[in-house]
Amino acid sequence: MEHRGKGGKGKGKGGKGGKDFRPGKRRDFRQGMEETNERRIRSYILANSGSESDINELEEVLKQDIGLHTNLVLETLLECGCEMPLKTGIYATVVGLLNLEHHQFVADFVAAALARYTDHLSKPETHREQARLALRFIASLVGVGAVQAGSLVALLASIVQVATDLAEEATAAEGCDPPVPNESWQPYAECLIYHVLACLPWVGADLRERDPEGLELVLTSAEVFLGQRKRGTRSIFRSVGVAQQEDGSAAGMDDDDEDFIEELWGRISVLHEGGNWNVQSVTKYHSPFEHRLAKAISHDLPAITLAPPPRPPAGASPAEALAMMTRMFPGRPRLRIVDHKKTEGDRAPIERFVIEEFIMDTLKLWEGLRQECVTQLTQLPLPRKWSYEHLLAETVFALMLTLPTPPARNVFYSMVLADLCRLKGPEGQPLLPMMANGLAATMGGLFRRMDLVDLESRGRIAEWLAFHLSNFSFSWPWDRWAHAATLPAIAPQRMFVEDVLQRMMRLSYWDRIALTVPVPLHPLMTPRPEPLYEYSTEGANADEREHAKQLLQHIKDKKQVKVIGEWVKSTLIEQLGPVAAAKVVAGVVLHLSSKSFTHLSTLLDRLGPLISIAAPSSLSETQGVLLSTAAKAWATSPQHLAITIERMMAKRLVQNTVIVDWVFATWEEAGGQAERSLTARLALWEILYSTVNKTSARSRDLKQDLEAAETASTAAAEGLRKASAQAATAVEDHLAAAEEARAAAESAKAETNVETRREAAAQAQSDLEALLRHVLQRFSQALSTGLAKALEDGAEMQEADAEDSGAE
C-alpha cells in the first residue's frame, strides 16, 4: 500500500514532504511574494513623514531591496514621486541619497521619469495632470544632485521652444493670402508653458545658483511666447465675468482680467526680478543631507522628442478645432473673489500659487477617499503659523465652478467643504478655525458680483449653498439678503436667493424652511407643495370628470390592467377622443401616485400600459397632453414635476423629443417672458437638462454593455479554440468532444449577445444624436424669434425717442 500521508513518498498530491512542486503553483508562489514585496516597499515609501530619521530609514530599506527587486523599487518610487505631490521633496531627497551608492539605478530612474513625462503628455485627456507632476518631480532632482542643472535647463528650453514654434507657425499661416485662421494650437502650447513655469518654484533657487544664464534663457523664451499668444481664447470659460468700465477696461480688482498663464508669469517675474527664489511653502527636505549630497555625481537627462499636438478631425471648423483642443488641455481653474489680504496676506505672490497647487493636487489625488482628502487638506506642508482657510475656500470654489465641467462632481466638493468646517482635533478644537469665515467671505464676494456670475456657475453655487446649509441647521445670515425680495424679478441676486430656497426645500420640507428664513424672504418661496387633482373640483369638464371617476373605480376594484385597457380603448377614447382620454388617464394615474416617489414608480410600472394605450408614441399630441397634465398636477412643486417626467421617459411612456418640444412650447406660450416665475423657469430648464442627460447616459451604458459583451465573446471564442484543439488530439475522447460542443454553444450565445448589444447601442446613439439635433434646432428657432422681437422693440423705442425729440 502506498502511504500518501504527510511527509510520505507516494504519488499523492504534494510529493515529497506533502509539498506541491507543480509549475503553476510555483508561479503562484512567486507572484504572491512579488505582491508582498510591493506592498512592503510601498508602505515604507508612503508612510514617510519627511523627517531626517524617516528619510534615513527609507534609504536603508531601499538599499537592501535594490539588488533583489530593482524594477519593483524603481517603479514604486517613481510612481510615488510623480503622483504624491505633497511629498515631492521627500522622494527627491531619497533618490539623491540613493545616487551616492547606486549611481546606475538612479540613471535608469531619471530616464524612466522623463519617459513617463512624455508618455503622459501624449495622453492629455487622462494623464494631463500626471505629466505636470512628473516634470515637477524631475526638476526637484536638481536640488539633490541627481540631475545636472544645465540638463534640466535644456529640457525646459526645448519644451518652451515647441510652444514658440507652434505660435510662429500659426502667425505665418494667418499672414498668408488668403489667411488661414487657426487658434487650436494655443491650448497645447499654453499647457507646455504652464508645465515649465509651474515647476520653477521647486527648482528656481537651484537653477539661479548653478546655471543662472540657463534660467534667464528659459524665462526669456517663455516671455517671447507670451507676446505671441492671443488673449481671450478661454474667456468663454470664465465662471465670473469681468466688470467693464465705460471705456471697456476692467473694473474692480486689478488682476480680474488676467488669465492663468499671465498671472503665473507675473508671480514668477516677481521672484526673478527680486533675485530671491526662496519659496517658503516648498520645504527643503534635503537640507540635513547637503553635506552628503554634495558628493553626488549628477546625471544628464536624455534628449526627448515631444509628441505633436493632437490633430482635429478632417473638415473641422476653426471653432470646432479650438473647442476640441481646449477640452483636452483646459486652463488652470482660477477664481479671484476674496480680498487679497485674506488669501495672500503679506506672503510673497508665488506662495499663493504653490498653496493652490497643493490644494488642487490633493483634491485630485484623494477624490475617491474623501475623509483622507479632508485630513490631507488640514495638513498641508506649510509653515505652522500660516492661515490658509480663505485661500482653501476660494480654490475649492474655483474647481467647483470650472466650465464647462468641473474635475469632480459638485457633491464631492460640497462634502469636502462641509467636512472641513466640522473637522476637530483630539481636544475638540477646530483644525481649521477660520474655514467658516473663508466660506462666508467667498460666498459674500460671489453674491455681490452675482450679475457677473455665469448662469451655470450660479446654479452650482445655489446647489452647494443649499446642501451646505442642510448640514448646519440652515443657519445663515439671511437678513443680509432680505433686500433681494424687493429687487426686480430678473435681478440676478433675487433669482439666486429664490433658487437657493427652492433647493433647500428639496433637502428639507416647506414648513422648516419657512420658519428658518425671515418673513421678508417668504415671497421668494414657492407655495406649499401639494398635488392638484383636476377632477376633484367642480370646474372640471363634466364628461372627463365622470370618466375619470369610472377609471379610478376600476383601478380601486383591482381589475386586470388588460381589462381596463380594453375599456380605455372601447369607451374612453371613443367617447372623449384621444386627447381628452390621454388627459383623463394621466390625471388619474398621477393622482394615485402622488403620495411618494415610490408610489410613482410602482404605479407607472403597473398602469403604464394604460398610458401607452391612451397616448401612444405615434401621437405626439397626446404625449404632449401627458406632460401638460403632469405640469398642472405639480404646479407648486418643480421637483415632483421634473422627477415625474423623468420617470415617464425612463418607462418609455413619453418620447424625449416630445419633452423637448413641450419645454419650448411652454416657454413660448408665456411669450418668452423673463418675468415669469423663477420656479417655472428652473423647472423647464431642469426637465430639458435631465432629458438630454438621461438619453446620453443610456447611450453610454449600452456602449459599456457592448464592450463587456465583446470581451466575453472573445473569451468564449478562445475557450472554443482550446477545446477544439484538445478534441483534435483525443479522437475517441467523448468528454473532450462534449466540452467542445459546450464551448461552441457558449461562443455562439456570446456572439448573439454581442449582435443584440451592438444593435441596441447603435439605436441609442442614433436616438441621442437625433435628440441633440432637435434641441439645437429648437434653440435656434427660439433665439431667432427672440432676436427678431428684440430688434423690433428696439426700432419702436428709437421711433418713440425720435418723436419725443421732435415734439420738444
Image (cartoon, helix red, strand yellow):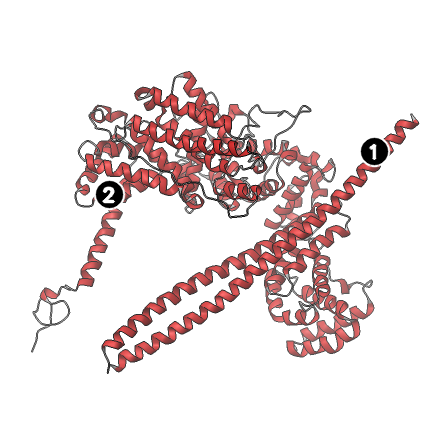
Residue 536: which numbered mark, if any? none
Residue 618, horizontal then vertical, whole percent: 68, 68
Observer-nearest of 420 and 61: 61
The reply to whether residue 743 is visible in this rendering is yes
Residue 25, horizontal then vertical, whole percent: 19, 62
> Could you tell which of marks 1 and 2 lies nearer the N-terminus?
2
Q: Residue 678, located in which quarter of the rendered image? A: top right
Secondary structure beneath label 2: helix
Residue underneath mark 1 = 798
For the N terminus, the quadrant is bottom left
Q: Residue at x 78, y 68 (%)?
A: 545
Q: Residue at x 63, y 34 (%)?
A: 452
Farthest-out residue, front: 177
536 to 153, vertically: above or below = below
Residue 263, horizontal then vertical, whole percent: 50, 27
Residue underneath mark 2 = 73
**Left or right: where does residue 807 sit relative to residue 313?**
right
Observer-nearest of 17 and 665: 665
664 to 86, vertically: above or below = below
**Left or right: where does residue 393 sit relative to residue 594?**
left
**Left or right: where does residue 403 sit relative to residue 712?**
right
